[in-house]
Image: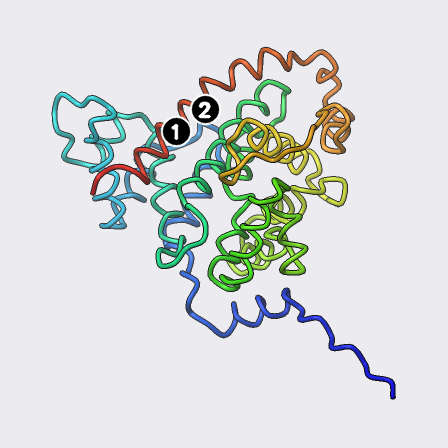
Amino acid sequence: MHVEPKPRINAMAVISARLEATKRLPSIPAILTPLLQHLQQPPDQQDINRLIDLISQDNSMAAQCLQMANSPLFGRMKAVETVRGAVLSLGIRRMQDIAMSCCLLKLSPTADCPVDVTVFWEHSFACALLAQRFAQKIGYPNPEAAYLAGLLHDIGIIVNLWMLPEEFSAAINQAHASHVPLHEAELDILGLTHCESGELLAERWKLAPEMIEVIRHHHHPESAREYRALVALVAVNDLMCRMRRLGHGYQEEYLIDFLEQPAFAILLAEFPNLKKFDWARFTFELESHVEEVQQLVTLVYKAPK
């Protein structure tokens, strides 16, 4: 008697249905959408008063930003008492980083979390910072978009933590034990990766099309149909962070030749000056970027409450 095999559970459908049916996943913070829009503007067009207004509209965020502005990490000699004072004291870019991190921190589950969210956001901020610097060096026209794309590229991990906690825990354990990329372990255990689940969340939040494309394709930039340069830019810097122990809490054990990566070929086609790019110098500069990222992560996620 022929017995039909049981169909494999469609994890994508499960996550999609749960996103529609449950309120477990935090909704996008009200300030995040206008903050993202503000951050995508060129630096010379960013309005300091607009940033102050955005932060001030959220009492809990304003309190967090003030607490951080007065952190011993910044060696404040005089207490900062207003959001305006914090922005003027720390600078608009630093306060943008702090405001974004406060928003994103609210999305992370706290109970029985199989992932150290500090490690997760450290990787995200490192990728954002490097993508922005790399974009500036190769002449990409919108470094601010590169920063945001780097920051949000792994947002699907948050979805998997909330929607498939047991399965994702098994995937992260397998990745750690085998030293393979996280998305490979996810595909093996869950049948999907954080790229697909992140795309669902990004569409639900109505993020910009270029951000959705990066979230969906950053591990396979050759599959992207649009915004290929931005997808490739994030893919290169995601790899660079993971190879420099700024990944997901473990060291991936395989060799990578960046010049042979599909992402590099995509960028090279659009930015021929990459042929003369000084990778050794950029890698050396990476060390100072790492220190900057670690300071921010310490400030936001490890500072005493």
Dots 1, 2 in contact, CB < 8 A: yes
Residue 162 percent location from the top left of the image: 46, 61
**For this rendering, which residue is in front, 1 or 9?**
1
Relative placement, left or right, of 41 versus 3 is left
Q: Residues within 10 Å of mark 2 (few under 14, many from 20)?
A: many
Q: Residue at x 21, y 31 (%)?
A: 71
Residue 123, labelled with which disc? none
**For this rendering, which residue is in front, 91 or 15?**
15
For the residue labelled by badge 1, is the local secondary structure a helix, a strand or a loop? Answer: helix
The three-letter amino acid code for the residue at tag 2 is: Val
For the residue labelled by badge 2, is the local secondary structure a helix, a strand or a loop? Answer: helix
Q: Residue at x 64, y 11 (%)?
A: 278
Residue 294, labelled with which disc? 1
Residue 109 percent location from the top left of the image: 39, 56
Which residue is labeled 2 in the image? 290
Which residue is the extreme one toward the left? 78
Q: Residues within 10 Å of mark 1 (few under 14, many from 20)?
A: some
Looking at the figure, which quarter contains the C terminus? top left
